[in-house]
Image (cartoon, grey):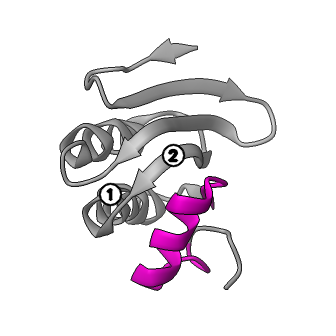
Amino acid sequence: MSDLRTHPDLRVAVVDDGAHGLRIRFGGRLTVHTAATARGAVALLTDAEATDILVDLDAVTDLDAAGVIAVTAPSMACRRAGKRVSVLGPSSPAARAAADRIGVLPLLGGGG
């Protein structure tokens, strides 16, 4: 497991996950204040050898539009590079409510 923690409000780790190749796990606040850290972490996966990537937002406790863009834009770049990208949406009620208000809950694997 590689810990990419570079912001005090956001935990980021990359885990070799047999089912998906790589799992990038986020925890804490995924907001305008941590967006650059999140974007950089996902962007690193564009050049990874793994063909399957899971963006795991399950432990995200706070989410805003900047946070959503921070993970979706590099995820799209991974797809253009030929990778399969899945997103596991947040389970925190506050983060899920924010995703619902933003209108991206279906894109984050949370129905809606």
Q: Residue at x 30, y 69 (%)?
A: 65
Residue 10 in magenta stretch: no
Stretch of the chain drawn in magenta:
87-107
Q: Amino acid at mark 1?
A: Gly
Q: CA distance from mark 1 to mark 2?
A: 10 Å
Label 1 packing within 10 angstroms: few (<14), some (14-19), many (20+):
many
Pick the front one: 61 or 110: 61
Residue that badge 2 annotates:
60
Residue 25 to residue 8: above or below: below
Which element type, helix, strand or loop, lies under badge 2? Answer: strand
Residue 85 to residue 11: above or below: below
Q: Amino acid at mark 2?
A: Val
Which label belongs to residue 67?
1
Q: Position of residue 42 (x, y in %)?
A: 38, 43
Which element type, helix, strand or loop, lies under badge 1? Answer: helix
Q: Mark 1 or 2 closer to N-term? A: 2
Instruction: Tell me where residue 112 sits by quadrant.
Output: bottom right
Asked if the residues shown at circle 1 and circle 2 are in contact, with their CB atoms under 8 angstroms apart, the answer is yes
Q: Position of residue 47 (x, y in %)?
A: 38, 38
Residue 31 to residue 80: above or below: above
Q: Position of residue 111 (x, y in %)?
A: 71, 80
Q: Is residue 86 visible?
A: no
Q: Is residue 37 visible?
A: yes
Pick the front one: 92 or 109: 92
Q: Position of residue 1 (x, y in %)?
A: 58, 14
Tell me if 84 is positioned left or right of 12 in this view.
right
